[in-house]
Image: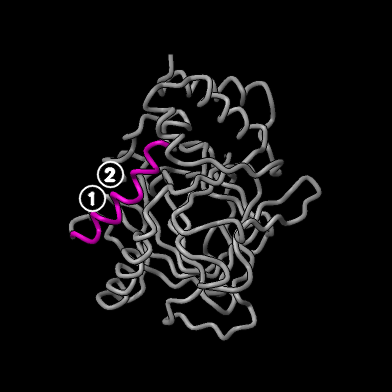
Amino acid sequence: MLNESSMRNYWEKMEAKNAPPKFVKKINTLEFSKLKKSINEKNEIFVKNLAKKMYNGEAFILRNAASKKLKNVIIQLAKECDRKQKPSFHKMLDGTPNFHRIIDKKITKKYSLYAIKHSYFFYNWNIKSKLEKKFKDGVYRHWRYVKYLAGNSRFKFEKNIPSQFQIDRLQIVNYPHGGGELRDHVDPRKNQRVVSGLIMSKKGIDFQKGGFYFRDKNNKKMNIEDNLEIGDSVIFYGSIVHGVEPVDQNEKLNWKSYRGRWFIGMFVNDSNHVKNRITAKDLTKSTNYSRKAG
């Protein structure tokens, strides 16, 4: 019978038997509605076969995982944050506010990953405004099913606060014209085996060069951004090497333009109440931060 316990056990058996994938083997396309229907109808064969393919190194583009209108919501939220708050930083402790931060070449050295981006961080205990609720609802209609696929209950961690050690964090990300990027890395699988993110921009319209990539078996970059549409999601097992190639690198970087690549990241983080918390692992040795991803 298909449930979160049987899915978790299925993953654990695969993980005990074989080493996790490092490189992507194949890119598949699947309508999100089919994943949703398969889980709702407890189609055990389909869902477990999907997990098996992912642990074998295959990634999936989930078409129409979110409404295309969500793009306008996140840009409105970003502009609202910029208008009301100065860039700042807050550890994940009880009472942490939503905040945004410009992560430039200097600031990124303090993080576990090398990234040039403007990030807007949102926590469920702060979701109050109509716009914030629209944002959250637009994300969770997709994320709850990805959590289930990964062996968690659909609502696990959603109401947690930092002193409970693991929390959901939503992140709106703008990789700006002029070199926004995210270098080679892998994500921790401790809380969330399956990585997912929502695409909120279109290459060729919002930006011209760069974008999301995997590493293949020859350790070459496989940029898939041309195949992505606004509202799609990309899901894969977190040990596969991936990143974002520099966005329109020859342009002049302007943090206030709201141009470039937009993305929604969703992750179950260890809070700062956890000692030796596990974070994503940069594979380029570009930062001063060192943690083991696992």
Q: How many marks?
A: 2
Q: Which mark is residue 186?
A: none
Name the residue rendered at 58%, 39% in the picture. 237
Q: Is residue 44 left or right of residue 55?
A: left
Q: Determine whether the residue tagged by mark 2 lies in a helix, strand or loop.
A: loop
Name the residue rendered at 51%, 44% in the picture. 195
Q: Is residue 166 magenta?
A: no
Q: Quadrant of the N terminus?
A: top left
Whole-percent x, y for residue 151 in the image: 45, 28
Q: Quadrant of residue 167?
A: top left
Label 2 belongs to which residue?
A: 161
Residue farthest toward the right in the current orientation of the protein: 218
Whole-percent x, y for residue 53 in the image: 63, 31
Q: Quadrant of residue 253?
A: bottom right
Q: Amino acid at mark 1?
A: Trp
Q: Quadrant of the C terminus?
A: top right
| Along the viewing direction, whichever of 77 and 47 lies nearer the viewer | 47
Label 1 belongs to which residue?
A: 125
Q: Determine whether the residue tagged by mark 1 lies in a helix, strand or loop.
A: helix
The rendered magenta stretch, by its main secondary structure, is classed as helix
Name the residue rendered at 54%, 70% in the picture. 116
| The residue stretch that appears in magenta | 130-145
Q: Is residue 67 left or right of residue 27?
A: left
The reply to whether the C-beta atoms of the residues labelled 1 and 2 are less than 8 Å apart is yes
Q: Is residue 157 left or right of residue 200?
A: left
Name the residue rendered at 67%, 54% in the picture. 283
